[in-house]
Amino acid sequence: MSKLDTAPYKGVRDFYPEDKFIQNYIFRIWRETAERFGFEEYDASVLEPSDIYKEKSGEEIVNEQTFTFTDRGGREVTMRPEMTPTLARMVAQKRRELGFPLRWYSIPNLFRYEATQRGRLREHWQFNADTFGIDNISADVEIIALADRIMKGFGATPDMYEIRLSTNAESKESLETVMQVLRHEGITNIRHDETLTRGQAYYTGVVFEFFDTHPDNNRSIFGGGRYDNLTALFGDSQPLSAVGIAAGDVTMRDFLETHGLLPTYTPATKLYVVLASHDMQTIDKGIQLGIKFRMEGVNTAIDFSGKKIGDQIKTADKHKVPYVLVFGDNEAASERYSIKELATGTETEGSFEDILSKLKE
């Protein structure tokens, strides 16, 4: 039998705990900032009928740049390469039931079959924020301000990125007004870029992108614009204005890494209980102690491996768990404990309440 390759499928990623920690951090800033602006989260299946992409982007793009297949019922299905058509479908489906204006956001998993390169993979997650039902520039300004607040939430300063805006000829007063209002709100790292174009054909007004100014990563981070009337693809006869913006987790991480803004990995586990006895009664008491810490809100792992004490402590250190508690016959009898902070070697001794107080500092 041949040996299987341990590498993931080309263009996708494995997320080890340290990687997932960073991705969750990015997602958290996205979510918290969007919700602070009054946006609500939505989601949908990764599978969509291929027709919604053919209608918007053309058959050639669907056939060459997407993961498309025929299901067992003979239906042509595509793994979503973007979220906006799905969003437009959802809004069109329940337009009469929804209260406008809408402020919605999502962090979908997206797939594109294309050549892989820095910042562009075949699978990624993407932050999307969209408003529906506001036909004046306040929606454009708010979406740009939201993205700017996200950048600042990651610790970025205005010199690290530039906001470039453009538009079609019909919306050129609109553009000047948007820039004027943004400056009034304190967002000054903006400029008009006539060369700026957005890849999707459905944009109808002002478009914008956030560019990394660092020479090692000079590329777009956020991109978006106004796309009025996209719901017409689904037979919606009433015009509906919309503005949206998006950022991928790959390009977001590249930006943070380039500017030294990545957070230091810290595991969710706070305490590692090392079982130092082979006596089943003592082991049971050690388990009960761990449960007691968990009930008090301290994330606790218990080592059942039966390894030597030193090896168990090495395991805790490898997982970057900050505190270790060795539990043996003496601890079981006395109900007095000692925890060691692995980073400093500092030890704290005392009752359960004493240890709990230290862990909650």
Image (tube, rainbow, N blue to C red):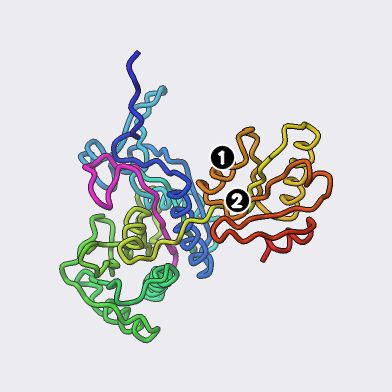
Tell how many labels: 2
Residue sitting nearer the eye, 311 or 90: 311
Label 1 sits on residue: 311
Q: The magenta stretch spans which residues?
A: 111-134
Q: Is residue 3 left or right of residue 214?
A: right
The answer to whether residue 240 shows anywhere in this view is: yes
Q: Residues within 10 Å of mark 2 (few under 14, many from 20)?
A: some
Q: Whole-percent x and y of residue 11?
A: 29, 40
Q: Is residue 335 left or right of residue 140?
A: right
- Which quarter of the picture shows residue 255? bottom left
Q: Whole-percent x and y of residue 117?
A: 23, 47
Residue 65's place in the image compared with 135, above or below, is above
The residues tagged by marks 1 and 2 sit, at their Cα atoms, a distance apart of 18 Å
Label 2 sits on residue: 269
**Secondary structure of the residue carrying numbered label 1:** helix
**Secondary structure of the residue carrying numbered label 2:** loop
Residue 270's place in the image compared with 360, above or below, is above
Residue sitting nearer the eye, 104 or 237: 104
- Under mark 1, the amino acid is Asp
The answer to whether residue 241 shows anywhere in this view is: no
